[in-house]
């Protein structure tokens, strides 16, 4: 079997994937993968606090993307659906998608009773389930932090296709330029950031197949250039969030 065939085979089966293999029966693991250990050893006991925190975070993306009541919004990587709830309140219609059946099951339950959300399982890098020029905005929260530049390239091409003219996309990324730079850090946070990086490096050494669940450190200019290549024009940055618009 030639190299190109084996790469294609791996891409098709989409393995290994730390996200796809999570189980709906292990709520604790789902929450750890979502928020790390910020909410302690038993995050399933603190779902209300996690929900509020994720909704507050999601609000920043909604504002930055200028989501309006009549908008159709695509959310890539909806996770437990905490941000999806907020989107459903702010937009007309939400198409929420994820590669993980377990997260989708959690999110469907979380959003029970909200009738303007449709959940779809997708394959990484493909938005084939969504029509051309059907979305006013695309929002992706704490997902592109796990994507490498090739993933971002394929998502950007798909996002360009599904966005209406002048549509916006807003997401956060893991900024490699901030690593270990004290001037970029919040007071008192320097150690924990450096510690976080080496913790991720340890996970990688233990099990390289966890790579997709780890942070993927990227350059903002690299992402901006890839965006331009894919017909997305960079508008602005706020903290680690980037906003692009479909170029006309
Ligand atoms: C850290 S969680 C964030 C969930 C949610 N957006 C939030 O902010 O609470 C990452 C989510 O992205 C999903 N995900 C990971 N890689 C993805 C990919 N390549 N395409 C789409 N979703 C992905 C995971 O299954 C998981 O639900």
Image (tube, rainbow, N blue to C red):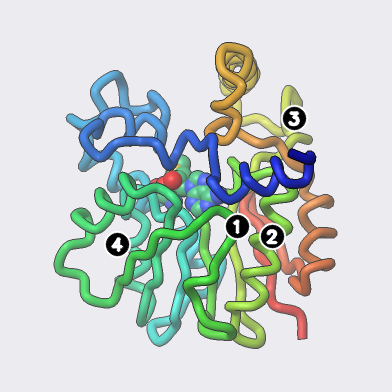
Q: Which mark is residue 148?
A: none
Q: Earlier in the sequence, mark 1 or mark 4?
A: 4
Q: Residue at x 71, y 63 (%)?
A: 236
Q: Are marks 2 and 1 in contact (CB under 8 Å)?
A: yes
Q: Which residue is mark 4?
A: 85
Q: Is mark 1 within 8 Å of ligand 1?
A: yes
Q: Separation of disc 2 and disc 4 at Cα?
A: 27 Å
Q: Are marks 1 and 4 in contact (CB under 8 Å)?
A: no
Q: Which dot, 2 or 4, sits closer to the camera? A: 2
Q: Are marks 2 and 4 in contact (CB under 8 Å)?
A: no
Q: Which residue is mark 1?
A: 125
Vertical placement of residue 170 versus 18, above or below? below
Q: Separation of disc 1 and disc 3 at Cα?
A: 34 Å
Q: Residues within 10 Å of mark 4 (few under 14, many from 20)?
A: many
Q: Quadrant of the N terminus?
A: top right
Q: Earlier in the sequence, mark 2 or mark 3?
A: 2
Q: Are marks 1 and 3 in contact (CB under 8 Å)?
A: no
Vertical placement of residue 96 versus 201, above or below? below
Vertical placement of residue 82 versus 27, above or below? below
Q: Which dot, 1 or 3, sits closer to the camera? A: 1
Residue 92, position as x, y percentages in the image = 36, 82
Residue farthest left in this picture: 113
Q: Are marks 2 and 3 in contact (CB under 8 Å)?
A: no
Q: Which mark is residue 154?
A: 2
Q: Residue at x 72, y 28 (%)?
A: 179
Q: Which residue is mark 3?
A: 183
Residue 246, position as x, y percentages in the image = 70, 78
């Amino acid at each position: 079997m030639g190299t190109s065939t084996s790469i294609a085979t791996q891409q098709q089966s989409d393995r290994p994937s730390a996200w796809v293999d999570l189980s709906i029966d292990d709520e604790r693991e789902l929450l750890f993968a979502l928020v790390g250990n910020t909410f302690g050893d038993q995050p399933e006991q603190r779902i209300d606090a996690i929900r509020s925190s994720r909704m507050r975070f999601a609000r920043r993306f909604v504002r930055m993307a200028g989501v309006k009541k009549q908008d159709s919004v695509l959310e890539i990587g909806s996770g437990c659906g905490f941000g999806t709830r907020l989107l459903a309140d702010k937009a007309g219609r939400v198409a929420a998608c994820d590669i993980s059946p377990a997260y989708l099951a959690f999110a469907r339950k979380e959003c029970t009773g909200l009738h303007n959300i449709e959940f779809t399982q997708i394959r990484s890098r493909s938005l084939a389930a969504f029509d051309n020029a059907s979305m006013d905005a695309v929002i992706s929260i704490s997902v592109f932090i796990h994507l490498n530049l090739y993933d971002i390239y394929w998502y950007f091409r798909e996002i360009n296709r599904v966005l209406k003219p002048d549509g916006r996309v807003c997401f956060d990324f893991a900024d490699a330029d901030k690593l270990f730079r004290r001037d970029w850090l919040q007071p008192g946070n320097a150690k924990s950031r450096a510690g976080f990086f080496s913790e991720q490096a340890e996970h990688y050494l233990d099990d390289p197949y966890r790579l997709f669940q780890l942070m993927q450190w990227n350059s903002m200019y690299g992402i901006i250039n890839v965006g331009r290549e894919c017909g997305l024009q960079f508008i602005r940055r706020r903290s680690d969030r980037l906003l692009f618009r479909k170029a006309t």
